[in-house]
Image: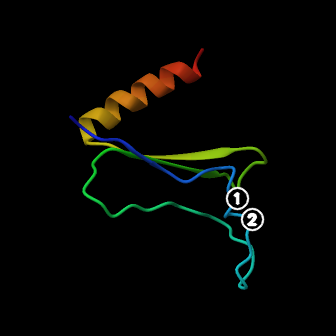
Amino acid sequence: MSKFGVSGSPKFDLLNSDFGWGKGRRMEVLSTDDEKYSMSLCNSSDSTGGLVVGMSLPKERMVAFATIFEDGLKL
């Protein structure tokens, strides 16, 4: 059985946080575990209210996911 990890949250807005060196322009969530299935979520810097979704899947599953996702956008 495969595990699927999810990280990040648009509710915890790190993109607009200032840690002393200015507001961020881009944010990416990285994971360094052995999982091959993961997803990350964060706010978009390109549009207000936008969401960036990062996916990490084996190639065959990524192709299937991309096809299903693209078909869903056409509805």
Q: Position of residue 43 (x, y in %)?
A: 67, 52
According to the picture, the residue beneath numbered tag 2 turns out to be: 16
Q: Position of residue 46 (x, y in %)?
A: 71, 53
Farthest residue to the bottom: give it.
20
Amino acid type at image mark 1? Asp
Q: Is residue 71 above or below residue 33?
A: above
Compared to residue 13, the image places residue 22 above or below, namely below
Callout 2 crowding tier (Cα within 10 Å): few <14, some 14–19, many ≥20: some
Q: Is residue 65 left or right of residue 51?
A: left
* Residue positioned 55% across, 54% down in the render: 8
In the picture, measured across the screen, residue 22 lies left or right of residue 51, that is right
Q: Amino acid at mark 2?
A: Asn
Report the Cα–Cα distance between label 2 and label 1. Answer: 6 Å
Q: Residue at x 43, y 23 (%)?
A: 68
Seen from the viewer's position, the closer of residues 12 and 58 is 12
The answer to whether residue 57 is left or right of residue 47 is left
SS at circle 1: loop
Mark sitting on residue 13: 1
> Which of the two residues, 29 or 44, is positioned nearer the viewer here?
29
Q: Quadrant of the N terminus?
A: top left
Whether residues under marks 2 and 1 lie with C-beta atoms below 8 angstroms apart, the answer is yes
Q: Quadrant of the C terminus?
A: top right
Mark sitting on residue 2: none
Which residue is pictured at 30% across the width and 60% down the height? 33
Q: Image height check: is 1 above or below 55? A: above
At horizontal 33% and vertical 28% (from top left) the residue drawn is 64
Picture layout, residue 19 above or below residue 47: below
Task: Find residue 20 and report its horizontal and vertical position in percent.
Answer: 73, 85
The local secondary structure at tag 2 comes to loop
Residue in front for this viewpoint, 61 or 70: 61
Residue located farthest toward the left when viewing the structure as drawn? 1
